[in-house]
Image (cartoon, grey):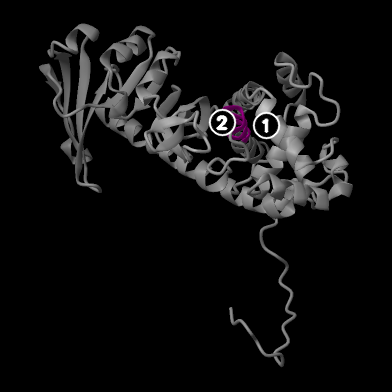
C-alpha cells in the first residue's frame, strides 16, 4: 500500500472511491466541471479537517506550497480559494452525505462485536442533538433566536464503536423531538434518549415497530402502579414497577403498559426515573444502558474540539452542510483505519499525528505505531540552556 505514497494518500486509500463516484453521478456533481472535480473538492476539504486548516486561504496556501506533491495526493485540479468556495456553494451537499453513509455502513460492520460497556447482544443507539452557534447577519437562513443563528446536528449514535448511524442537519429552531418523525426504528434495537424526547405518541410508534426505548421520565408523570418487582438496593436501584398512564393528555397516546425504574446514583447524588417498554432485561441493565447515553455527549464534544465544524469556510446552507458531512466522513474514516490496522492509538492521537505527517512518505502503520523517538543523547552540557525542560 505504501510504495512511496504520502501519508495523506494512504489515508485516502481507505475510502471506497467507486462508491464515491456513484454518489457524484447520482447528483451530477461533475456536470460542466472541467478542472476541479468533486473528488478534488473532497480531498481539499478532507485535508483541511486532518490538518486543522482555519480558512480557505489557509487551505490554498498550504496546498500550493506543496504543489509538486498534489498529483500524488490525488488532487488533479488547480487549487484556488475562489474555486473551492464556489464548489462548496454550488455542489450538492447530498453527495457527501450519501458517501458518509457508505463509510458509516462499513464502519458499523467493523465494530459489530465491539464491547460498549453493557453485556447485551442487541444494537443500542443513543439519540441526541447538539447546537452549533452562528452569526445571524452572516447565516440568516439558520434561524434560531431573534438575535442568534444556529444549526442543530441531530445524531443517532451506534454505541458499538460510537459510530453515527443517522445524522440530520437542521436550523436551530427545529426541536429535537421532531426527529422521531423521520427516524425509522429497527426491530429489536434499543433507543436511549433524554427526557427532551418524551412524547408518548412517538414512543408508541417505536413500541409498534417492535423496538425498545429507555428514556428519562418527567417529574409530574401521571401514572398508576400495577405491581412491583423486587430490586437489590445495594446496586442503586430503588424500585422496578409496571405502570399504566392515567393522565388525560398522555394515556390515549400510549395505551399499553410501561416499566418504571428508579435508580439512585451515589456519585452524583441524583435519582433517575426511567421509562422503558422492555420487560425482559434486568432493571440494573436498563439503568446501565441509560448511563451509556453519555457517549453521545462525548461524541459531540470530540467532533467540536477536533474537527472543523464550528468555523465554516462558506456561508450558504449548502456550504455548511458540505463541511459538516465531510467532517463526519473523516471521523468515521479515522475509526475505520483504527480498526483495520488493529492499533490501540486513540482517534485524537491519530488526528494529531496525521496533521503533522500528511506530506511524509512513510507507511501509515509505522507513523501511527512509532510513538517513541530513538533515544539519542546529543546534549552538549557546556552549552547554556535557554529552556530547562
Between discs 1 and 2, the one toward the N terminus: 1
Relative image position of residue 52 (x, y in whole percent) = 64, 49
- The region drawn magenta spans 317-326
Residue at coordinates 61% horizontally, 24% vertically from top-left?
97
Left or right of 212? Residue 60 is: right
Q: Which mark is residue 319?
A: none
Label tally: 2
Q: Secondary structure at mark 2?
A: loop
Left or right of 371? Residue 156 is: left
Which one is nearer the viewer's eye here, 389 or 280? Answer: 389
Q: Main secondary structure of the magenta part?
A: helix
Relative image position of residue 125 (x, y in whole percent) = 43, 26
Q: Which residue is mark 1?
A: 88
Residue at coordinates 71% horizontally, 48% vertically from top-left?
57
Mark 1 vs mark 2: in front: 1
Q: Is the residue marked by circle 2 packed among few (<14), some (14-19), or many (20+) residues within 10 Å? A: some
Q: Is residue 311 magenta?
A: no
Are dots 1 and 2 in contact, CB under 8 Å? Answer: no
Q: CA distance from mark 1 to mark 2?
A: 32 Å
Q: Secondary structure at mark 1?
A: helix
Relative image position of residue 229 (x, y in whole percent) = 16, 23
Which one is nearer the viewer's eye here, 103 or 311? Answer: 311
Q: Which residue is mark 2?
A: 111
Residue at coordinates 16% horizontally, 29% vertically from top-left?
219
Amino acid at each position: 500500500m505504501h510504495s512511496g505514497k504520502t501519508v495523506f494518500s494512504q489515508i485516502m486509500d481507505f475510502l471506497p472511491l467507486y462508491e464515491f463516484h456513484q454518489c457524484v453521478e447520482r447528483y451530477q456533481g461533475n456536470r460542466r466541471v472541467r478542472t476541479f472535480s468533486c473528488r478534488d473538492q473532497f480531498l481539499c476539504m478532507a485535508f483541511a479537517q486532518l490538518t486543522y486548516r482555519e480558512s480557505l486561504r489557509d487551505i490554498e496556501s498550504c496546498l500550493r506550497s506543496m504543489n509538486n506533491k498534489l498529483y500524488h495526493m490525488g488532487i488533479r485540479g488547480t487549487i484556488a480559494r475562489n474555486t473551492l468556495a464556489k464548489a462548496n456553494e454550488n455542489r450538492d451537499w447530498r453527495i457527501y452525505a450519501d458517501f458518509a453513509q457508505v463509510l458509516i455502513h462499513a464502519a458499523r460492520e467493523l465494530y459489530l462485536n465491539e464491547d460498549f460497556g453493557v453485556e447485551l447482544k442487541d444494537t443500542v443507539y443513543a439519540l441526541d442533538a447538539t447546537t452549533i452557534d452562528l452569526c445571524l447577519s452572516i447565516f440568516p437562513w439558520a434561524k434560531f433566536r431573534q438575535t442568534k443563528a444556529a444549526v442543530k446536528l441531530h445524531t443517532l449514535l451506534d454505541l458499538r464503536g460510537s459510530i453515527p448511524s443517522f445524522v440530520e442537519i437542521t436550523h436551530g429552531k427545529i426541536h429535537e423531538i421532531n426527529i422521531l418523525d423521520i427516524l425509522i426504528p429497527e426491530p429489536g434495537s434499543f433507543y436511549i434518549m433524554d427526557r427532551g424526547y418524551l412524547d408518548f405518541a412517538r414512543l408508541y410508534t417505536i413500541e409498534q415497530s417492535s423496538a425498545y426505548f429507555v428514556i428519562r421520565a418527567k417529574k409530574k408523570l401521571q401514572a398508576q402502579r400495577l405491581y412491583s418487582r423486587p430490586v437489590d438496593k445495594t446496586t442503586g436501584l430503588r424500585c422496578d414497577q409496571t405502570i399504566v398512564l392515567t393522565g388525560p393528555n398522555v394515556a390515549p397516546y400510549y395505551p399499553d403498559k410501561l416499566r418504571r425504574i428508579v435508580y439512585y446514583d451515589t456519585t452524583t447524588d441524583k435519582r433517575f426515573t426511567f421509562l422503558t417498554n422492555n420487560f425482559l432485561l434486568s432493571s440494573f441493565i436498563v439503568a446501565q444502558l441509560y448511563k451509556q447515553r453519555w457517549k453521545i455527549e462525548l461524541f459531540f464534544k470530540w467532533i467540536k474540539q477536533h474537527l472543523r465544524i464550528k468555523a465554516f469556510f462558506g456561508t450558504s446552507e449548502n456550504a455548511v452542510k458540505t463541511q459538516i458531512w465531510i467532517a463526519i466522513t473523516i471521523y468515521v474514516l479515522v475509526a475505520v483505519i483504527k480498526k483495520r490496522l488493529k492499533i490501540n492509538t486513540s482517534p485524537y492521537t491519530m488526528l494529531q499525528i496525521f496533521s503533522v505527517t500528511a506530506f511524509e512518505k512513510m507507511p501509515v502503520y509505522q507513523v501511527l505505531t512509532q510513538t517513541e523517538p530513538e533515544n539519542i543523547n546529543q546534549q552538549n552540557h557546556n552549552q547554556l540552556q535557554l529552556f530547562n525542560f
